[in-house]
Amino acid sequence: MNKIIYFSFASLAFITIIAIVYFRKKKLKTIEIKIFTKILILTILCLVFEILSAFPFMNSILWLKLFLKKLFLISMFLLVVNYFKYTIILIKGINYTFSKIEKIIINSVEIIVSLAILVTSLHLNVGDDGVVINSYGLAQSIGSMASMGIIVIIMILLLINIKKLTSRRAIPLLFLVILMFCAGYIQILFPSILLINFCLSFVAVIMSMTIENPDLKIIEQLNIARDTAEKANEAKTDFLSNMSHEIRTPLNAIVGFSNLLLEDESVPDSAKDEVRDIVMASDNLLEIVNGILDISKIEANKLEIVNTEYSLKKLCDELVSLSRGRLGDKPIEFKTKFDPSIPDVLYGDSTRIKQICVNILTNAIKYTKEGWIEFKISGIIKNDVCRLIISVEDTGIGIKKENIDKLFNKFERIDLEDNITIEGTGLGLAITKKLVELMNGKIVVQSVFGKGSKFTVSIDQRIVKNPTIKLDEEINSEEKTIINNKRVLLVDDNKINLKVAEKLLESYGIDTESVDSGFVAIEKIQNNEKYDMILLDDMMPKMSGVETLKKLKEIPGFNITTIALTANALTGMKEKYLSEGFDDYLAKPINKDELNRIINKYLNND
Ligand code: ADP
């Protein structure tokens, strides 16, 4: 027996072990894995046919020997075709599927070449010692030429797409092509050395241990799935951010002009009622947009708790006046109880604490027809931490026992048939719970159906002993003062928004000048035009507000108060704009009280 056949024996033993391990592993069902499975099986078949035909006793059963040789040639060809398919997948991407026509062409070539090898003649070249040196004949030529032809096609495809092939996957294929050429050349020079099979199994083994390793492939797929999910989530967040911007921009006009109409003395009272309804409807719409943004931010882990020093008393005052306003003329007594031992200044996220309280207070107002609502805050002080116990109790419709667990699910509304007239999205409590948890707090509900409910939130806040904020700085934001001799530059690419801001500021007696881009604003400042404040929109084409401010700050002597005015309300915006160098932040739609605060803070010299 040809001693070189030991190569094939060793290869067969090795690749069989590898194949057993490979087939026992859990695999994905991708087309690439299917092709590689065929490659492994065909490599083993090539080796089996080659070894069987090389046994000495085969010399006496010549027809069987020739038949095995032919089977070897066919499996070798099919193996090379599968490497070709693998190359195509590599180039086109793992999600590529062969079209019907491509499949028909490939299958036809496989059948025609296999049949041609089977029916044409094959002869054996026997040496003087009776040992078969090699085989020749039409079948041999068809098998070798077809296989070599496909190897050449693989090589050309790899070379043409070399730039695309950045993946590690291309390496074994390049290796295969080079080895096959070398092995083919050696076999022509020394026909008795059976190297091709050895090379093929060598490449298959390397592939199964590296790039085609099922475990690595599953991890790879998991990574791809995670990346895709992350991208989809980012796209959703981007979409929501854009949607928020798009909805807020027209809302700004609706809210701004409606508020101006309410103040306009020439508008008859009957019309004012309708304008009030417009304001209320816009406020509801804004709350829905904000709710959707908040929940998506929380789900994308993008909601950050921003801790600052704040006055709890001021926060409570705001909440009480807001709730009283929302009660309208409902026959409900609004009771408050604030623990006087709670320190004046605490350190925490007052915006989010306010949001939590607003949500449960608004629910109490919404779901109570008559009776009373009690808003109570008590504190438990331990070292430098104050545990705030905030509770809102009502004599409202109450919640059935079986519904308590569902309360905090997003978009879940309870007893919808009874509450159909009460507006809501079912997001409030879902957001509230997440916010409380983000602050390491707890929320509990006690309720008796038909009698009333009590929502209790507990959150730890640090006590600030030496506050840096001034408690007496508070300016009554309700009061509108007339401010003379002040000039404000308005920068916004949206004409309606400019008009809203102009009218709102003019109602304070403030002079305004409007420009529609950062470029014009910079030009004005460079030309030494004097302003007391700049209201700068951020999302503008070509040059954003942030970029404009950067350029403005480069102008020597520039020290005008600049306020970011933006409909972009997605991520902790106020902090973002302050860190970009803005003096303050005003969200669109412009809230009257916020505008009042800003005007009083920066333009009111008294
Ligand atoms: P929304 O109020 O927008 O429907 P929420 O998430 O704030 O959504 O509340 C979810 C549900 O919990 C409400 O639909 C309501 O049925 C119930 N609920 C919340 N607060 C109260 C309350 N104080 N009294 C009675 N039911 C309430």
Image: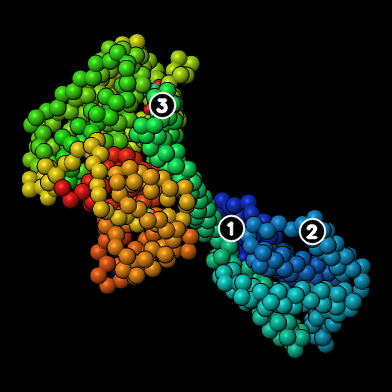
Foreground: disc 1 or disc 2: 2
Amino acid carrying mark 1 in the image: Tyr
Q: Residue at x 34, y 10 (%)?
A: 450
Q: In the rendering, at what x and y percent does residue 207 appear?
A: 59, 67
Q: Position of residue 327 (x, y in %)?
A: 31, 21
Q: Amino acid at mark 2?
A: Lys
Q: Secondary structure at mark 3?
A: loop
Q: Which residue is mark 3?
A: 268
Which is more N-terminal, label 3 or label 1?
Answer: 1
Percent x, y for residue 544?
Answer: 42, 61
Q: Report the Cα–Cα distance between label 1 and label 3.
A: 84 Å
Quarter holding the N terminus? bottom right
Looking at the image, do the residues carrying marks 1 and 2 touch, with CB atoms under 8 Å apart? no
Q: Which residue is mark 2?
A: 103
Q: Which mark is residue 22?
A: 1
Answer few, some or many: residues within 10 Å of disc 1's Cα (few below 14, many 20 plus, some between 14 and 19). some
Under mark 3, the amino acid is Pro
Q: Is residue 240 above or below residue 111?
A: above
Q: Which mark is residue 363?
A: none
Residue 44 visible? The answer is: no
Q: Is residue 547 above or below residue 490?
A: below
Ligand 1's image quarter is top left
Relative height, residue 433 to residue 47 (above, below):
above
Q: Nearer the viewer, mark 2 or mark 3?
A: 3
Real-space CA distance between mark 2 and mark 3, rounded to the nearest whole angstrom: 78 Å
Q: CA distance from mark 1 to mark 2?
A: 26 Å
